[in-house]
Amino acid sequence: MDVQIKKIEKMIYQIRGQKVMLDGDLAELYEVETKRLNEQVRRNIKRFPSDFMFQLSYQEFSNLKSQIATSSTHGGLRKLPTAFTENGVAMLSGILNSDRAIFINIAIMRIFTKLRSFLLLEKDISNRVDNLEQGTNKMFKIVFERLDEIEETIAPKLPANRKKIGLKN
């Protein structure tokens, strides 16, 4: 079974501040009809609380369609897509037991883990840059304070008609 990691990564969207996958994309990966996937979810609805899956609003779906090239998977829909969070996708593995579903879920979980690691690394780098910036600002403040002190001590000794550097006369 050949699953392209890039293809799966493109199927992960940011909606309501969460990384999610849509029912149509998951059905395509599992090689089942979307209605069959949703049917299994409905039969096991207790496994899918609202933080595991939710239905997109019309506005969310419109925004999503404008961000991506509308594929046939999300084209003429009768109902709005269902979005599955990482936990929801993991829960799907408990209700879809085909070899294909197991294989796909393992690949998806690895991608979610990779994305989480990347986000943690990005946050760490951002924190380091912020700390460097704060340190640099402190250093410049100290340097300018020292320059002001030096200027105050030597200013009385300089000729009165001397041009100051950086000032227009």
Image: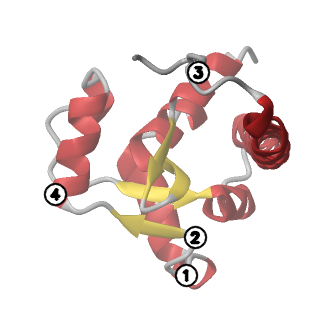
- Tell me how far mark 2 sits from mark 3, CA to CA: 67 Å
For the N terminus, which image quadrant? Answer: top right
Q: Is residue 93 left or right of residue 162?
A: right
At x 29%, y 23%, the residue is 71
Say what secondary structure mark 3 lies in.
loop
**Mark before the other along the chain sequence, 2 or 3:** 2
- Tell me how far mark 4 sits from mark 3, CA to CA: 65 Å
Q: Nearer the viewer, mark 4 or mark 1?
A: 4
- Going by the numbered disc 2, the residue's amino acid type is Phe
Q: Is residue 128 visible?
A: no
Give the image quarter of residue 82: bottom left
Q: Nearer the viewer, residue 169 or 115?
A: 169
At x 57%, y 70%, the residue is 52
At x 55%, y 75%, the residue is 51
Looking at the image, which residue sits at the far bottom?
A: 46
- The numbered disc on residue 52 is 2
Q: Is residue 78 left or right of residue 98?
A: left
Say what secondary structure mark 4 lies in.
helix
Say what secondary structure mark 1 lies in.
loop
- Going by the numbered disc 3, the residue's amino acid type is Lys
**Mark before the other along the chain sequence, 4 or 3:** 4
Mark 3 vs 1: CB contact within 8 A: no
Q: Label 4: which residue?
A: 58
Q: Nearer the viewer, mark 3 or mark 1?
A: 3
Q: Nearer the viewer, residue 162 or 113?
A: 162
- The numbered disc on residue 49 is 1
Mark 2 vs 1: CB contact within 8 A: yes
- Going by the numbered disc 1, the residue's amino acid type is Pro
- Tell me how far mark 3 sits from mark 1, CA to CA: 71 Å
Q: Label 3: which residue?
A: 164
- Going by the numbered disc 4, the residue's amino acid type is Tyr
